[in-house]
Every structure is written in C-alpha cells, then in structure tokens.
Image (spheres, coloured by chain):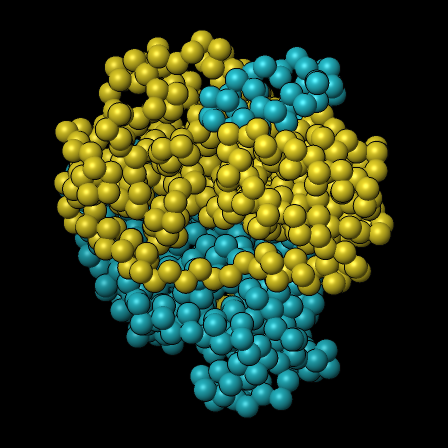
Chain colours: A cyan, B yellow
Amino acid sequence: MKWLTGNTVDILTALNEDFRLTQEDNQQVEEQVRQIIRQVIQNGDQALKDYSKKFDQVELQELFISQETIDQGYQQVEKEVIAALEAAKENIISYHQKQKQHDFMDTEKTGVLRGQLVLPLARVGVYVPGGTAAYPSSVLMNVLPAKIAGVKEIIMVTPPSVNGVPDVILAAAKIAGVNKIFQIGGAQSIAALAYGTETVPKVDKIVGPGNIYVATAKKQVFGVVGIDMIAGPSEIGILADESANPTYIAADLLSQAEHDTLARTILVTNSISLAEQVEKDIYRQLESLPRKEIAIQAIKNHGRIIIASTIASMFTIMNEIAPEHLEVQLTDPISYLHEIKNAGSIFLGEYASEPVGDYFSGTNHVLPTSGTAKFYSPLGVYDFVKYSQVTYYTKEALAEVKDAITVLARKEGLEAHARAIEYRFD
Amino acid sequence: MKWLTGNTVDILTALNEDFRLTQEDNQQVEEQVRQIIRQVIQNGDQALKDYSKKFDQVELQELFISQETIDQGYQQVEKEVIAALEAAKENIISYHQKQKQHDFMDTEKTGVLRGQLVLPLARVGVYVPGGTAAYPSSVLMNVLPAKIAGVKEIIMVTPPSVNGVPDVILAAAKIAGVNKIFQIGGAQSIAALAYGTETVPKVDKIVGPGNIYVATAKKQVFGVVGIDMIAGPSEIGILADESANPTYIAADLLSQAEHDTLARTILVTNSISLAEQVEKDIYRQLESLPRKEIAIQAIKNHGRIIIASTIASMFTIMNEIAPEHLEVQLTDPISYLHEIKNAGSIFLGEYASEPVGDYFSGTNHVLPTSGTAKFYSPLGVYDFVKYSQVTYYTKEALAEVKDAITVLARKEGLEAHARAIEYRFD
C-alpha cells in the first residue's frame, strides 16, 4: 500500500492527484451508445433482439420473462439463501420506511394556503448487471425503496444469457416484488426503458449500476427520464486509533478490495504501529482469498495508508475523501458523529463491519462513490418520489400583495405577468 | 391555437407526437463545450479571461466582483423593487423552512442502531444568465433554499458585460446572501465551478438555468459535481370548466407565452364555449403586449386547446402532460387535489394566478419543465443536502445475524466479505 504522511495540506494535495475525478472522455463509446439508442427508438423490440444476438450471443424469442420461469428459478435456490434474503428484506423495509416523507400545508397568512405534496413516481426501471456482477442483494436494495415510496410498477432488465438469467436473481426479484422482468442488457435496455418499445413500457426513472455502455446510455437519456447517480470506483475509508483491531481492519479493507481492481481502500490513523500491523495482516489474509488477484491489484494501486498527527486532522482528511463507506474504529466512536461531513454509509465501532451493511442491516448499499458523497446520497425512498407545490389565494389575499408582484414583473420586463394579476381587479 | 378533440387516447397520442422529448443531438456544441472545459482545467483564470474576450467581448481585469461594486449596484435599485424583493424573500424563507428534514435514529433491535443524518452541501454554485434573461427573482429562488439547507458558501457566476452586471442582479444577490460573485458566463463558468481555478473555488453542486452551452456543460460535468435538473421549454397547463373566467385564463396563458417562443400553453376543458372565449381573449390581450411577437409565436406553435368530455379525462390528460405550472380553475378546486399525479407547482382557484408563484408566494419558481414533473421536483431545500447512513452493532447483535450475512456473501462469491464477519468471532 502507498503510505502518505506529513501535514494535512500535503496529504490532501497528494490524494487529490491520486483520486481526482476527471471528465470521462470516451467519444467512441458515446457515439456507439447514441447509435444504439437511435436504433431502439426506431425499431423497438426488433432492435433489442438484434443487439442481444450481436452483443450477448443469444437469439431471443421473447424479451419478457414469464412468471413461470421466475417461479422455477426461485424453487432452485437454496432454502438458506431464500431465508437470508427474506431477513434482509425485512430489515431494508424497516429502515427505509423511516425515510417516508409527508405532505405539508402552511396556513400562516390569512387567505393563503401553501403546501407540498409527496407523490410516488408511477413506473421505475431497474438495471441488474449480468455475469459475475449479478448480485441478488442489489436487487433488493434497488427495488424495495421504490416499493416503499409507492411506485406501482417496477420493471427489471438484465442481460440475456444462454444459460438464462441466474436463479438467485429471479428469486430476489420475486422476493422484492418486481412487476416485470425483461432479458435485455447494455445500452439497448436503457434506451428501451427511456423511450418504450412494443413490449417494454417507458419508465419515469432508471436506477441500478452497469458497465460503461449502461452508464453512458443513462447519461444520454438523463432528462428524458430520471436516473440515479453514476457509479464510479467504490471505496472504503477507515478511521482508526491504536485501540483498533488490525485484523478486523485488514479484513474490512479486503472486503472492499475484492470487488474490483479499481476499488479504493484507505486507512487513516494516528498510529504508525497499527498501520504496520494492518498492512502485514492484509498480505497474510490475502493469501487464501479466492479473489486474491483482484484484491491485490486494488490494494497495491489504490490502497492508501495515511498517517495523521491528530484525530482532528484524521477527520479533515476523511471528509475530503468523502468515502462511500466509512468505518470509525476509534474509542467511543459515537462521540465523533458530528465530525463527519461527507460519507455515504457510516459504520461505528469494531462490530459494524461493512458487509453488515452490504447484506443485512437494512441501510442501503447503493451509495455515492469516488468522493461524490459530498453531494450525493445513498439510494433511498426519496429517489422514488417527487414533490408538487400547492398554492391557493383568496381575492383579498391577492389584493394585498398585488403591487409587489407587478413591480417585480415589470422590473423584469414581463408585462403579461403583471397584467395577469391586474385583470383580476379590473 | 391548435385544438385537440376526440377520445382521451387520441388526444394523448397527438400530444405525445407534439411534445415528445427526444435525445438532443448536438455534437458540435458538445465538442465545443468539451474543449472549453479542457481549457479551463488547464489554464484556469487565464482561460476564463480569454473566453470572456472571445464570447462576451469584455476584457476583464478581475473575475471577482467586489463588495463595493455590489453595494453600489444595490443603491441604484428603486426602493419599491428592493422592498418587493425583501417581501418575496420573507415568503420564500417561510415556505422553504417547512422543507427542512431531520436526522432519524432507529433502535428497534437490541444492540443495533441505524440512522440517517441530513447534512448540508459545503459549497454551491449558482448560474445566473445575462442579458434579458437576468431575473432577480430567480436569484432569490436559487440561493435561498441553499441558505436554509445550511450551505456555508454560495458562489454566483453571471456573464460579464461592458455595462457591468445589472444592478438589480447585484441587489438580489446581496438580499439573498450570496457569498461571492464572479463575472463569468457560458460553459467556461460551469467548468470553473466544477474544477476550480486560482480564484474560483470548486463547488459541490451547480444550479441555475442557462443557454445550450451552459446546459451542455452542466451535463458534461455531472458526476464531478452535482447539478440540478436540465431545463427545457417551460409550460403552463390550465384545467377549467364553464365556471372559469376566460379573461383570467387568457392572461395566465399569455404570462407563460411571453417568456419564450418555445413556451407551451395548454388549456384542458370540458367547455367548448369557454375555450372559444379564451382563444378570442388571448388575441385581444395580445395586441397591447410589449412582448407580443414572442407570445404570438408561442401561442401559435405551442398553444393547445384540448376538449375533454369529462373532468376525469381532463385529469388523465393533464397528468400525462405533467405541466411545470398547473392551474386548477374548476368549481371547488381543492376537492381535486388527490387527482393530480404530476405537476411542478399547482395553483388552485381563480386568484392563484401563476405569477403569484413566480414572484411572491414563496413556493419555488425553478420547476421541472417539458413533462419532467413525472420524476423531477421543484428546486428545494432537499437539493442542497445529502444523507449519510449510520450503523452500529454490538458483538452480540452481530453474532445473531452473522450466518445470514455469510450465506449471502458466499452466494455472491465474495469470500472476503464473509471472512470480515467471521474474523470477529475467531
């Protein structure tokens, strides 16, 4: 792992160089995606089938996956997996229900009513990647907040495969309450959800992670439909002092590193001896990991050990990193909550290991990555609602304020705005 | 105006053709913007000055606008305008304060704590267009929700002009509490806010409407920073029955039409005689409008009168349109609130004329346009906060659920995730 030491400013400058977010410049992919979207708009289902043949090497008769196929898939999954998914579902629901928001009405001025309605989106599309990145836990995390928000129709798309969609994905979709599943992947599936085809309904918003083609397609249809955040390399940041257990820290860093060679694993500590033990333990634990090759690349290229002189500077540095996952392995961790400014999901103490949140606690595991926790939030119920403002004025209430309105309208050169008010008093 | 009649399905099909949102394909602008962003990243302030000379014909010594200049501008503005802006500010604050959200903590399971923190963004950039589109009311609408959210630093950018930034814009910025103003416009100002330069601080999110270059730049930096919705042609939809006043409806439609030749004005009614009177009144009122040429284009090309047979079908059609502004000019308008599924801002009854919301009531006038109210919300306090999840487990609580976690982790092939839990119990 690369060590960074010195004063806070130097460390932040070095990190900024290492992790700087840059405008992705991939015009070839962008142009290819633009073509795919155009084709899907023009040729609908036929375009989807053609792309499946071309990109997935699958000749599809049907895009739609029948209830029978879903039920059969569910039956094939081990009972203990089904039970674990059901238990996770219960926790996800109980956590996300607390995110539900309520309408408000304000009547503080005579004759005036102002309010805000919280309304669910009507129809949402969820992209579920194929291959080794097909995670049943992510199906629950993407679908259940939409259900709780009151979304009536949830459409899942996932790449076709000669072996069919994995049973455990079908089972997770059934458990989560997905309404329809289509076997379509890549940019073409995003186009289908954004514009609709003969069989795929147009949705209002598309969520779920995908490869570069999926991400580029989402960015291109953004505005035609809503999209969730665009996922980049994910990361874990751990704040630890000498009281922390190096074995747990090493294990948690590796759980992030095994995802992806680009995954970032960052320890910030004021204890050099802890840092040394963690690093040693990482290489020891690595040896027997099935995904050793991935994890080792991640640790070598994107692992950082940062030595800070004080707890305060540890927080300054970590807030600048704004990690997707933040573990606080300090003595009395809860006392530091107010120091955290930017983090997707915060894990306090030595038993809140990150995988607890990935699979079970009920908090969402779809989180802002690559430092975007400075402005993005975890996926939540709030992503599946929109607000409408409500205004009512009596004639008397309008009369009282009409001069202020017409003064501002005329100052902006918008005479028809002023007259719309004045006609009411002619 | 174009009339649409017939059954609901036919009307919706026709509207869909007319108003269909399509993927904007402007590769020339995209490439130009990409270059501009690259230049600003490389050359910072010098690039900004070069572009000001090239695009705005202004040679700038300083990008930053001094407090003295701002105060002088404020002094130049008519007292009644200042008073109206102050009154609007008070209403905007009192409405938006109701949007503030609170942290929550959940302790329903023994040994487990889960929660959500609501944290303000640290720094926000607000784009304010120049020329005739420089609206002081929009400065208040973009800045005040960020202040209420707790954003510490609000940076405004607005195009330079040989005559300087308009006094009323400086005054509105002062009233709203903007922290710094830079005279930079176009794609280069978005690049400066997204990446930072020697004098312009990097922000976490950029809001505010702009021309095609600004909108394209925002889309390109999306992910590096947060952005608000991308604004398209704006619209008003009015639901009216025979009890409604045609003069008011005509005036309200015109107040939208005068904005822009692309503005959409849509009346949905079950009364042919009302529709006829509205149309007649529009052409009568148009005659004396200063912005007649703009309004007439909007009305002719993007005005629609839709005749529906029932109140229920009126709502079906309007929900499909999902208007930015929706006026409900029906008898007993409040009784129909539950019928509205998609609308940015709803105005009930004949005295809640749309300009009340544009200037004064305190609800936001930055709203989802072009039918995007199906998935977007008005600008609000929620746009300037992000959430962090919090999780704490005791050893005993983790012991109880560890098998479910490891089962799921191993089913997904993520052995290091399972081991991170198991190391805690070795």
- Which corner quadrant holds the N terminus of chain A? bottom left
Where residue B248 appears, as percent x and y from the top left, is 70, 30
Q: Quadrant of residue A294?
A: bottom left
Q: Pinpoint residue A163: horizontal percent, then vertical percent.
A: 55, 88
Quarter of the view holding residue B105:
top right
**Labels in figure, total:** 0
Q: Nearer the viewer, residue A424 or B85?
A: A424
- Confirm whether residue B274 shows in the render: yes
In percent of the image, x 61 and y 62: which residue is there? B17
Q: In this picture, is B320 found above or below B9?
A: above
Q: Left or right? Give the position of B85 relative to B69.
A: right
Position of B207 relative to A168 (above/below): above
Residue A89, horizontal then vertical, whole percent: 64, 59
Task: Name the residue: 49% across, 76% down.
Answer: A39
Residue located at (38% from left, 24% from top): B169
Relative to residue A275, is residue A10 drawn left or right?
Answer: left
**A29 or A46, which lies in front?**
A46
List x then y, in percent, for residue B269. Answer: 78, 45
Q: Nearer the viewer, residue A32 or A86?
A: A32
Query: Would residue A341 be found to the left or right of residue B111 on screen?
Result: left
Residue A380 is at least partly visible in this image: no
> Residue drawn 51% across and 29% down?
B290
The quadrant of the rendering that contains the C terminus of chain A is top right
Q: Quadrant of residue B120?
A: top left
